[in-house]
Amino acid sequence: MQYEYDYENRLVKVVYPGGSYEKYIYSPVGKRLAIERYDANEATPEDIRYFVYDALRCNNVYEFSTSTGIINRYIYINPGNELVAKISTLSANLLSLSYYHSDALGSVSMITDANGNVNNTYNYEPFGNILSSTGKGDAYKFIGTIYGVEDDGMSGLYHMNNRYYDASTGRFVSRDIVRGYVSDPLSLNRYVYCKNNPVMYIDPEGLSWYGDLSVVSEYVTENVNTFYNNLKQANEMYKKILVTAQETGLEGSWMGPQDAWRHAEWSREVTEKLGLNIAIIGGYGHELFDPISVWSTLTSEKPIQNLLMDLHNNREGRRTAGTTTTVDDLLKGGQLRTINPPCGGKGGTY
């Protein structure tokens, strides 16, 4: 197979032996929106799979195939954000209702129907290859119920949110945006999966072997004091960057270029100095749970766009950590998002 990537190191095309290929379409904040499947030498896709996400938790809640017309709706429970069921319909008619059962890592071990009959079973090798299975295949398998990792199907890759993973080799097919840490030598290998220890660890976000929000509980439990102190330090860093952002002279301290610069610069510095997990948790926590931030977002003219803008700029800032790219470069290149006034470069606004 042949892989092609875009300027953000995202997989955008897979070419298969024989010439058929798939294209991957992403949103401005990096979420996969669609997969287009083409026959060899054809310019019109034979099938398009669309993905719709929960705006707050970023779960995949709907999938639609243009070739079959089937809509799959996914049901989650909280706390835990766990995938528990799938409702499949065609032209508003119910086709099936399936329930997911998982193992300790969050991989699907069994799928049952509404009557409790077992339709699918799965057993895995440590790195995610399916050792044995029964029943028709399902998109969610390896660490799929709690973490939203999805089997891409035709390519045989697992979609781990920020990049794709090949279970047959135990490696990601693109580099980690995090360069790693000298104190943790295995993290310097930007393709390795879970420090080569997939029995103990998971990496459902494709960012670090601790993962994103859904898998930080172990990290927090084992490092409570360090975790708490780092969050306090991250908050102090935000206060300083708030002043620095004002000193840049950029316009738009609210939903403008200065706002975008502030979010990205904070995320970059926190990732470099305190680690990726603190940057992710602090960023999401501020946007979704801080009372002042939430109230400001909800009372803004464009609340959803405002939230997506901040989350996108946080993510872009994290991506520059450990690189020579500066936040000023992102702003000038139009990679940051604003509402008013606009950033420079293409695609700079919502």
Image (tube, rainbow, N blue to C red):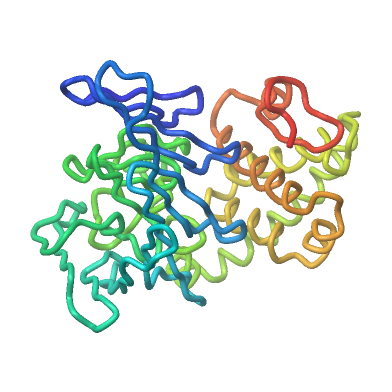
Is 293 or 61 nearer to us in this picture?
Answer: 61
Question: Where in the figure is residue 213, as x and y percent of width and height?
Answer: 51, 61
Residue at image position (24%, 71%) is: 111
Question: Where in the figure is residue 250, as x and y percent of width and height?
Answer: 88, 29
Relative placement, left or right, of 249 versus 18 is right
Q: Quadrant of residue 258?
A: top right
Q: In which quarter of the image is residue 266?
A: top right
Residue at image position (11%, 61%) is: 133
Query: As drawn, which residue projects farthest toward the top?
Result: 41
Is 216 or 98 nearer to us in this picture?
Answer: 98
Q: In which quarter of the image is residue 281?
A: bottom right
Residue at image position (84%, 58%) is: 296
Relative placement, left or right, of 322 versus 335 is left
Relative to residue 139, is residue 43 depicted above or below?
above
Is 116 or 223 nearer to us in this picture?
Answer: 116
Is 30 or 195 nearer to us in this picture?
Answer: 30
Relative to residue 207, is residue 256 depicted above or below?
above
- Point out the image quarter for the N terminus: top left
Picture mark count: 0
- Point out the image quarter for the C terminus: top right
Residue at image position (53%, 39%) is: 30
Question: Where in the figure is residue 4, as x and y percent of width and height?
Answer: 36, 22
Relative to residue 289, is residue 274 depicted above or below?
above
Question: Where in the figure is residue 325, as x and y percent of width and height?
Answer: 61, 24
Relative placement, left or right, of 77 versus 188 is right
Query: As drawn, which residue projects farthest toward the left?
Result: 132
